[in-house]
Amino acid sequence: MGEFTAQGCPAECRGCSHRHLDEAASLAQKESWLAERLAPWAGALRRIEALRGAERWGYRDKAVLKARWDSQAGWRFGMEVRDALVPLERCPVQSKRVRAVLAWLAESLPPSGAFPLAIVSVVGAQASLILKTRNDPGDGWMAGKTEALARTGLEGLWLHLFPCAGRHLFGAGPMRLLWGKPLSRNPLGLLHGPQGFQQLVPSLHARSLDEAETFLDPGPETAVIDLYCGGGATLARWTARGARALGIELSGEALDNARLNAPGASLLRGRCALRIPQAEEWIRGVPRSSRLVYANPPRTGLEPEITEWLAKTCRPARIAYLSCSAGTLARDLETLSSNGYVAVSITPYDFFPQTRHVETLSLLQRSVELEDDNPPFASNAPTRRFLGV
């Protein structure tokens, strides 16, 4: 495995439950779990798509770590377990960039008395220092150190003042760019800032997006509703194909990035469930056969109101649903299946090597039904229709 192996992982670390399983055992356990949770759709469930060999280590280019000052060792970074810090500066699943940034911080930061650092967040080439204070300590401590900082691979370093830092990462306090530029491009070429979300394995993420795009087949005659759209990775694909696209997202920074990454898309900020009326208005007049939906919700799955709306009112021709929880996915698939949707395929993607987590892409199409193919307010007579892929 070259430089990256499980050797040296602190025994107390709770971050990677599979780190002592070999590749085959880890993937087999994930496939077994999915087969159990998604048993009603066993015929659609495929083999897991995964990284192999050395690629399964050093993949995590995103980290959120607690910071603690030690009078002997200086700054340490890791996770808290029973009020003790488990140091993770050399965690083998973290990327070389993350480890280089942590090494630079350990060498460059002033002592905690002058710099009350609570959390370090790294998202690709952007990093944030989250201080548990309202008082800005300035940036004099960075003098003469930025050349070494640039060599870490970082492109932007931020200071965030958040007196309540702890359980929550970012608050209402100010964000100030200490050094570098405010935006970077991820491996897919998309712009993101210091709070941007991105999947951990870009190559697998791109494969999942290719699969979703091929299935949805967006074009000038279609309209795509992109639920929990994030920074616009999928919106950019739909608009590039000439489709009308609507993205709905709670994060303000994510929507700012989506405006840059998919300038032709319409955007709504807020919980998806609360934006159903606006989505209804946006899709008004579009035949159901031309309606497409892509969804990538958090671990809690689709909001119940969204599942109900998709199943009974919006009724798109095809749905691509990327889920990070087999449990909530099964719940949502049950509702959609009972309302006339068929799972064409369910593909697991191992976005989280060395852990028990797995991402799953479900492709659903509306089956034979007796209903009007146009929106509910249209006057056309009902026709029987099968919506193929």
Image (cartoon, rainbow, N blue to C red):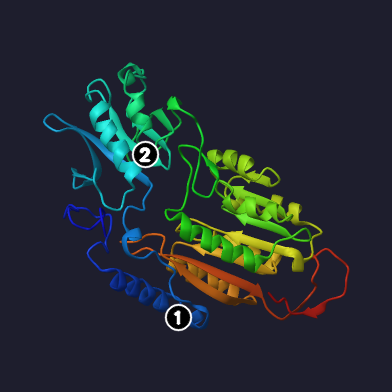
Q: Is residue 194 left or right of residue 118?
A: right
Work out which quarter of the rendered image holds the C terminus and state it.
bottom right
Front in this rendered view, residue 283 or 18: 18
Label 2–label 1 contact, CB within 8 A: no
Is residue 273 visible in the rendered image? The answer is no
Quadrant in which the N terminus appears: bottom left
Q: Which residue is mark 2?
A: 121
User: Is 229 placed above or below 178 here?
Assistant: below
Is 290 on the left-hand or right-hand side of 121?
A: right
Whether residue 83 is situated above or below residue 308 in the rendered picture: above
From what the image shows, is residue 244 above or below residue 166?
below
Label annotation for residue 39: 1
| Image position of 363 with respect to 59: above or below | below
Secondary structure under tag 1 reads helix
Q: Name which residue lies at 65% across and 77% down.
A: 340
Secondary element at image label 2? strand
Q: Label 2 is placed on what type of residue?
A: Ser
Corner quadrant of residue 357: bottom left
Where residue 157 appears, x then y in whole percent? 40, 30
Residue type of the residue flagged with mark 1: Ala
Q: Could you tell me which residue is drawn at 49 percent across and 29 percent down?
A: 181
